[in-house]
Amino acid sequence: MIVSYLLILLVLVPWQADPVQAQPELRTLIRQSLDECHLGRIAQERALRLTHFEKGQRLGEQAVSLDDKSPDAHFALFCSLGELMRLDGEMSLGSVLGFRRMMKELDRTIELAPDHLDALSAKGTFLVRLPAMLGGNPDTGEQLLRRVIAGEPTAVNARLSLAKSYCARGRHNEAIVLASEALALAEAQHRDDFIPEAKRVMAQLHAAADTSR
């Protein structure tokens, strides 16, 4: 269900950073932004999730302002923007401007770092899930997700996204294998942000496989 979501854009005052201090400060901002995104993912209360994601967005914006050519800064900002858009469940496309801004940050990450596996995983996920009118392309998306898995054998999100795509295209057995691997990896890595999702996907895939028989 598409739910409208108002995304408040924060205006940052441009300033010149001391080049000696810029890189350590940039790394700190990126790490803090990604930490907030992670904390928001594992938080149980909506209000707390919102607080973490909004703080992650602010920190990401500061990182991008400090260095527009840092792919990790753009990805950190994308992380919180994306989570804000799916705060109440699946990704909401109700805010066209918010969606475009989120995708702009993702595409900028890949433009600056074509081998950025986290960004490629996110891009592949969007391509397999979005309708064609919004730029979806399952074939290209699956290729990107397989590329991510090849480059990072312990990738969890890429496996879950690829499993969902395979299931949607009738490849149920392959989908279940991928989702099983994703769940095992998430548990081995103690990824509290992915374990619940992996379990849900497994249940959905088994149900879809039973229905197709």
Image (cartoon, helix red, strand yellow):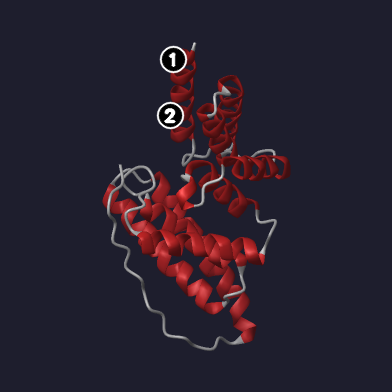
> Could you say which disc has been placed on residue 95 in the image?
none
Of 165 and 184, the residue lying toward us: 165
Residue 111 in the image: state x and y as whole percent. 64, 65
Q: Amino acid at mark 2?
A: Arg
Q: Is residue 56 above or below residue 171?
A: below
Q: Secondary structure at mark 1?
A: helix
Q: Amino acid at mark 1?
A: Thr
Mark 1 burial class by Cα count in 10 Å: few <14, some 14-19, many 20+ = few
Mark 2 burial class by Cα count in 10 Å: few <14, some 14-19, many 20+ = few
Residue 145 in the image: state x and y as whole percent. 63, 42
Residue 17 in the image: state x and y as whole percent. 55, 86
Of 140 and 55, the residue lying toward us: 140
Q: CA distance from mark 1 to mark 2?
A: 17 Å
Residue on which the image places disc 1: 211
Q: Is residue 152 above or below residue 212?
A: below
Residue on which the image places disc 2: 200
- Sequence-first tag of 1 and 2: 2
In the image, what residue occupies the spot 34% across and 51% down?
49
Can residue 38 be seen at all in this image of the molecule? yes
Q: Which residue lies most toward the front here?
A: 133
In the image, what residue occupies the spot 32% across and 54% down?
94
Q: Taking 36 as reference, is 113 left or right?
A: right
Of 92 and 115, the residue lying toward us: 92
In the image, what residue occupies the spot 46% across and 50% down?
133
Q: Which residue lies most toward the right here?
A: 150
Q: Taking 113 as reference, is 98 left or right?
A: left
